[in-house]
Amino acid sequence: MLRRFASVALALVVSSSLACRSAAPPPHVGPPPPPPGATAQAPTGAPAPPADAPPTSAASTTGDHLEVRWVRQSAEYEAAVRQVYLMAEDQVERAAVGRAAGTWGVVLDADETVISNLTYQIERAGRPHDEDAWSAWIKRREATALPGAAAFLARVRALGGRIAIVTNRREPVCDDTRAVFDARGLAYDLMLCRTGPSDKNPRFEAVQSGLLPSTLPPLTVVAFVGDNIQDFPKLSQAIRGAGDDAFVEFGSRFFVIPNPMYGSWEGR
């Protein structure tokens, strides 16, 4: 009887010890990291970007705002850009039928449409635009091609179309911009940089009429591609809320590349 009592007592002691151990709190591991975009400065030891994220400079690991991070590492951004260019290519394929080579063309913006300045945005870390810093970045000639851009431009050329780049990069850095296009294998026939007001409409009209500053013959423009509403003829932020009819050419002749980082919408 005494032996049985001792066995029962020992079992109770072991069971109590195990219960206490299982109820003990886990070791301290520190507070959870803040949600993405909650702070401009990433905490020490923050998770690294996904393995399939595009390569970036060392500055990209800290200081990213959420909109920059989305462009830098999301699959959705790349998919959206490629989708726009595939839709634009479909339009060009249809529009080229029956047109003589050299009589038609496309007009594209440069920044965040054909070339990416993501590294510049990362380095600026949310600071406001500065014209001197922007010019210095352009002169570095480090902008890269957006996904799908080179293939689209090559297809336009193959179908007999001309390519006009209408950008608000200023004339003094136009040669640097041409150098980037050449280095990245981005085809173009004409590049019209900004020499006066930022309004692109006079340059759009020059491309279509064949008048200076265009150096090409008159072109029927079958597609416009841009990341800003002002990259399309006679349009501005005022189109927002104007109704369905105001947007009828988007997806058929006008094609918008997503750009959540900056644009004319900031002044609204």
Image (tube, grey):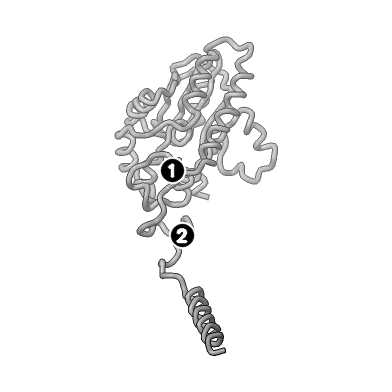
Q: Residues within 10 Å of mark 1 (few under 14, many from 20)?
A: few
Three-letter amino acid code at the position of disc 1:
Ala
Q: Quadrant of the N terminus?
A: bottom right
x 54%, y 17%: residue: 219
Question: Seen in the image, is 11 located left or right of residue 42?
Answer: right
Looking at the image, do the residues carrying marks 2 and 1 touch, with CB atoms under 8 Å apart? no
Which residue, as the protein is rendered here, is positioned at the far right?
244
Name the residue nearer the viewer: 214 or 104: 104
* Residue 186 x %, y %: 43, 24
User: Mark 2 to mark 1: distance in Å?
Assistant: 23 Å
Question: Seen in the image, is 127 located left or right of residue 159?
Answer: left
Disc number lying in front (2 or 1): 1
Three-letter amino acid code at the position of disc 2:
Ala
Is 191 placed above or below 159 here?
below
User: Is residue 33 in view?
Assistant: yes
- Labelled disc at residue 38: 2
- Labelled disc at residue 139: none
Secondary structure of residue under mark 1: loop
x 66%, y 37%: residue: 246
Q: Residues within 10 Å of mark 2 (few under 14, many from 20)?
A: few
Name the residue nearer the viewer: 265 or 186: 186
x 49%, y 19%: residue: 154
* Residue 126 x %, y %: 40, 51
User: Is residue 233 in view?
Assistant: no
Q: Earlier in the sequence, mark 2 or mark 1?
A: 2
Is 31 placed above or below 15 here?
above
* Residue highlighted by disc 1: 51
Is 86 placed above or below 104 here?
below
Name the residue nearer the viewer: 233 or 78: 78
* Residue 129 x %, y %: 38, 46
